[in-house]
Image: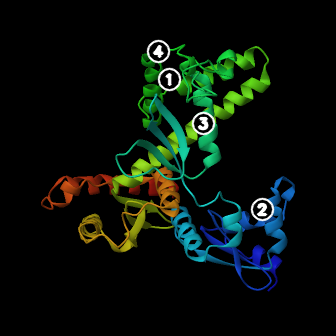
Amino acid sequence: MNLKEKVHSLPLTPGVYLMKDSLGHIIYVGKAKQLRKRVQSYFYNNKGHSPKVVQLVRNIRDLEYRLTDTEFEAFMLECQLIKEIKPMYNRKMKNPLAYSYISVREDKVRRQLEVSYDPGPPGEKLHFGPYTSRSTVERALQGIKESQRILCSNPHTRSSLCLNHSLGLCIGMCGGGASMEAYNRIIDRVIALLDGRDLSILNDLEQRMNEAAERFDFEAAAKYRDYAGAVQALLQKEKVSRFTGENNNIAVLEPMDGDVIKLILIKGARIIYRTSLDLRHMDHERLQAAVHSAIFEHFTAEAPEGAGTINRHTIDEAQIIYSYLKSSSGNYLIIPPEWLAAAPESLLADAVVKLLADCLEQLEEVD
């Protein structure tokens, strides 16, 4: 069977596809809700493809695929295979593997915001991240500094005002033109923004974008739009990093075709157990017992080796899980540790009943 025939014969179900070159090496791994449609998109209507995708397609000579029961599992399998195989084009299409952090560093004069690859020893300085795109971090920080007028072009002196002060981009910390109190208030607002506690700086960027558009200054409007988008991306990544660090116990129920549901148990950013439950062979009582037993058994077991490690793949996996949980289609339960220490007729049992009821209701809507 040639490549064209293989693509045409792909199923319209969730799964992962593995692209191969002329030597049979896997050069790209991707995921899809409907395999055939996704893979066909590489070969048809390709005028909008980026140069990297065009180059990938030129080198594809064969493919294989792996089916999954759900789209969510396809996303997670893609992450796992990329981590194991390290395909050439997955690396080319992503940023370098280094992480970036935003640090608040104390120097002899004042607190400074800086981008670095290493947050330093714990407790040495306040930092946010890790972030997987340094360019996004730098663009966001540029927008924050510019909008708050702390984009000093000579931050290490207090003897004279810098050039940016004359351009309205610096409040004058460099030449004693601004009080340390005013500067510290701004830095505190930046910290509150990155913490997700105060979005007023983001609102200010969006307001500047709207005002520029109203006066038909579309270049400035585009600049502030990009700044605001970069800040929003940072806030999203910070939520994901925080979510990953919490190492939650999460039970997910996904409806499948027919009278089947999928139970997936996640610890932090790692799937630790999954099973299909056929409703045709289980009454409600047996179903509740099966879910409750699986949750209790696997979340009270010893954590797998490396479970607390945060790396790029962990962040990618956490992003998938976080996005799934925040979507309207997800049926999930975050299980506090104290629920696992209680008797069976505890809050956990009640929560399992509610989780199953929501999933069964969704299954009826699909049918």
Residue 353: image x %, image y %? 27, 56
Residue under label 1, please give it: 200
Mark 4 and mark 3: Cα distance apart in space: 25 Å
The disc at residue 152 is none
- Which residue carries the number 2 mark? 41
Q: CA distance from mark 2 to mark 3?
A: 33 Å
Residue 143 visible (yes or no): yes
Disc 1, SS:
helix
Q: Is residue 262 above or below residue 241?
A: below
* CA gap, disc 2 and disc 4: 58 Å
Question: What x and y, as percent, mark residue 90?
Answer: 67, 66
For marks 2 and 4 on the same chain, the one whose residue lies earlier in the sequence:
2
| Amino acid at pointer 3 | Ala
Residue 161 lies in quadrant: top right
Q: Is residue 140 above or below residue 86?
A: above
Q: Circle 4 is placed at which residue position?
A: 179
Q: Which residue is mark 3?
A: 140
| Numbered disc in front, either 1 or 4 | 4
Instruction: Name the one closer to the observer, 35 or 241.
Output: 241
Quadrant of the rendered image containing residue 11 = bottom right
Asked if disc 1 and disc 3 are in contact, CB closer than 8 Å, the reply is no
Percent across and percent down for residue 142 are: 62, 33
> How far apart, in angstroms, are the residues tagged by discs 2 and 1?
41 Å
